[in-house]
Image: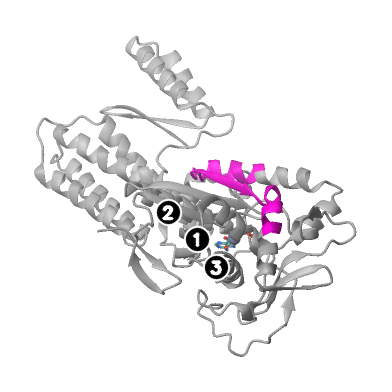
Amino acid sequence: MPLRFYNTLTQQVQPFVPVEPNVVRMYTCGPTVYDYAHIGNFRTFVFYDLLRRVLRLNGLKLDHVMNITDVDDKIIRNAVAQGKSLADYTNLYTQAFLDDCATLRLERPERLARATEHIPEMATAIRKLEESGHTYRSDGSVYFRISTFPGYGKLSHNDFEGMVAGARVDVDSYDKTDARDFALWKAPKPGEPSWDTEIGSGRPGWHIECSVMAIEFLGATLDIHAGGVDLIFPHHENEIAQAEALTGKPFANYWLHSEFLLVDGQKMSKSLGNFYTLRDLCGELGHAPEAIRYLLASAPYRKSLNFTMDSLRSAATAIDRLRNFKLRLESAKFDDGRNTKIVDAGEEAVRTFYHALNDDLNTAEALAAIFEFVRETNIAMDEGQFFSGNREGALNVLRDFDSFFDVLKPTAPAGGLPDAEIDRLVAERTAAKKARDFARSDRIRAELLEQGVILEDTKDGVRWKRK
Ligand code: AMP
Ligand code: ZN
């Protein structure tokens, strides 16, 4: 099936066709680096990673830009409270964010754009908007007059007929039904960082950052613009107004939005206090990053996902099942031959897997296809109906699965033994046993156990896994 996505702009599932064949110009809204990101935020960042992977699976080259918002009200408030410079404060959380992304195996966008490194370009864009009559000034701030942009509301599908002309807002986020003129540029305040630019002194609003950096790196029209559903209004609506008022061209052809991670039916968020960071879950609570990645990836991105510790444990169990299956394929001895039913089942699983991913990233259906194959194949192995000629094909199914889900390789625990060292010790223990040096082989087993590695002696040899 050709790749297709649900487009928030058209409210339809549409075949994906980039402007330039084979290259995807994509912009995703990145983090505001005022604190550690929580796993709700990471649901959206995992979605970006899956989006990248499905595009590449379709042979497309990526030019993906993600912004880092390193100046906003919350950042300024926190930096001032801690007596830190803006840069010192945001560098810490930017690095923490990038480390967390690496822990979750998220591919790096081709470009990361820090807002504070593009302020002159933002000032130039605001000047152009002023010149074309889209703005007005009040007390040193510059506002976008939304009544000058007839398309306002086309993304959120809100009818802003009754909107109060001239009502304006200084904060970056506000209520769904509340269309107001928004700040492009904020007047300097005592004790707050500000920049001297061609339009005067001050700092940019959040929305202008994204429009300007997207156009600067990717051109007037993007193929894909993505974010969490909370960004549809006002952020993305405002991005469209600014960008299209500037260029006169459609800003993005496909708008993709991921649903929330919930806790007891409510959005996981800092303000509700119902959140976990990656560090909370993987540190003291001892969960594996792969389990978090799996959990966040397993629900289709347009469905909200309720987070529970039970669901996280089920994710870990699902990964274990796949790892045990892989180990069995790699280490069991099979009779010569080939069962064509298993060959067919593997091909069918892979076909359904890619079909589901191309169908607006239906990850749940893609997973179901893999687990069905695992179930059938395990039964065939138990019944002696799986042969050495089936091994490679079955391993290939897992390889395809993992090129997208990327959860099979265990994360080495901090300070724990690397895989190669475990393999070496296992081989040494096998040699000791062969030489009937049981004291030594027992010592190695105990040593590995102390490092959290469990050995299993099977008729096909030794398997190991991390606790
Ligand atoms: P922020 O750092 O607050 O700008 O948020 C970064 C991204 O996380 C945005 O794209 C939000 O839409 C997204 N986000 C925030 N909370 C959640 C949640 N509970 N579930 C999914 N995405 C979220
Ligand atoms: Zn944005």
**Marks 1 and 3, Cα distance to the nearest angstrom?**
17 Å
Q: Earlier in the sequence, mark 3 or mark 2?
A: 2
**Marks 1 and 2, Cα distance to the nearest angstrom?**
10 Å
Give the extent of the magenta segment: 95-124
Label 1, secondary structure: give it: strand
Type of amino acid under label 3: Glu
Going 19% across and 41% down the picture, which residue do you hit? 381
Of residues 134 and 48, the one drawn nearer to the viewer in this rendering: 134
Q: Answer few, some or many: residues within 10 Å of disc 2's Cα (few below 14, many 20 plus, some between 14 and 19).
A: some
* Mark 3 CB within 8 Å of ligand 2: no
Farthest residue toward the front? 131
**Where is residue 194, by image quadrant?**
bottom right
Residue 72 in the image: x percent, y percent? 73, 59
**Numbered badge on residue 318:** none
Say which residue label 3 marks. Answer: 244
Of residues 189 and 457, the one drawn nearer to the viewer in this rendering: 189
Label 2, secondary structure: give it: helix
Farthest residue toward the bottom? 162
Q: Answer few, some or many: residues within 10 Å of disc 3's Cα (few below 14, many 20 plus, some between 14 and 19).
A: some
Type of amino acid under label 1: Ala
Farthest residue toward the top? 435
Say which residue label 2 marks. Answer: 51
Is 201 situated above or below 84?
below
Asked whether residue 9 is drawn in magenta, I would say no
Residue 132 in the image: x percent, y percent? 65, 70
